[in-house]
Image (tube, grey):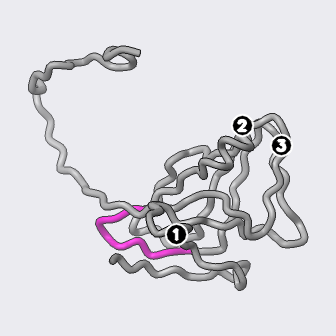
Amino acid sequence: MLTIAFLRLPHNPDLPLPRYATAGAAGLDLLAAVRADDPLILPPGERALIPTGLAMAVPPGYEAQVRPRSGLALKNGITVLNSPGTIDSDYRGEIGVILLNAGRAPFTIARGDRIAQLVITATAQARLIEVNELPETGRGAGGFGSTGI
């Protein structure tokens, strides 16, 4: 099992570290580290950067992806705007979640609310070469709906 170091920042002395909700979960729950006495109200059509109060050390060869929570998306229209957001292995700043309210009602984000999920995945860096032509495939340049509905 992969080990990842997390650092609590001063505005998060109390919230639990991210955890998997079930034994088969792919994503760790990220919690909002907004002030307890000042919940954030996200109006319809607006976006905000939500702090988690955590930084992490993603090992080389991996990334952490910040993804929406399906329940928030379905029930409230709340999604991660740059989904998936990537946390590179050399980033050491606070994990922030850019939430968008695509719903029709204001949405309140309180301290400790589960706002997104964090998926750890392996990555590879590629060596790029320039060529004069690409190898043929059955699909060719067809895209954006070319394979049917």
- Judged from the image, the secondary structure of the residue bearing numbered disc 1 is loop
Could you say where residue 51 lies in the image, as x and y percent from the top left?
Answer: 68, 65
Q: Mark 3 points at which residue?
A: 43
In the image, what residue type sits under mark 2?
Answer: Ala
Instruction: Give the residue displayed 60% in from the left and 48% down from the top.
Output: 70
Q: Gap between marks 3 and 2, in whole Å?
A: 9 Å
Of the numbered discs 1 and 3, the one sitting upstream in the chain is: 1
Q: Name the residue under label 1.
A: 20
Instruction: Give the residue displayed 50% in from the left and 49% down from the top.
Output: 84
Q: Give the range drawn in magenta.
A: 55-63
User: Which one is in front, 145 or 90?
Assistant: 145
Q: In which quarter of the image is the C terminus?
A: top left
Q: Gap between marks 1 and 2, in whole Å?
A: 26 Å
Of the numbered discs 3 and 2, the one sitting upstream in the chain is: 3
Q: How crowded is mark 3: few (under 14 residues within 10 Å), some or many (20 or more)?
A: some
In the image, what residue type sits under mark 1?
Answer: Tyr
Could you say where residue 16 lies in the image, as x and y percent from the top left?
Answer: 64, 79
Identify the image quadrant of residue 124. Answer: bottom left
Disc number at residue 140?
none
| Mark 1 or 2: the one toward you | 1
135 sits to left or right of 120? left
The answer to the question of whether label 1 and label 2 lie on touching residues, with beta carbons closer than 8 A, is no
148 sits to left or right of 56? left
85 is within the stretch colored magenta: no
| Mark 1 or 3: the one toward you | 1
20 sits to left or right of 97? left
Q: Mark 2 points at which residue?
A: 102
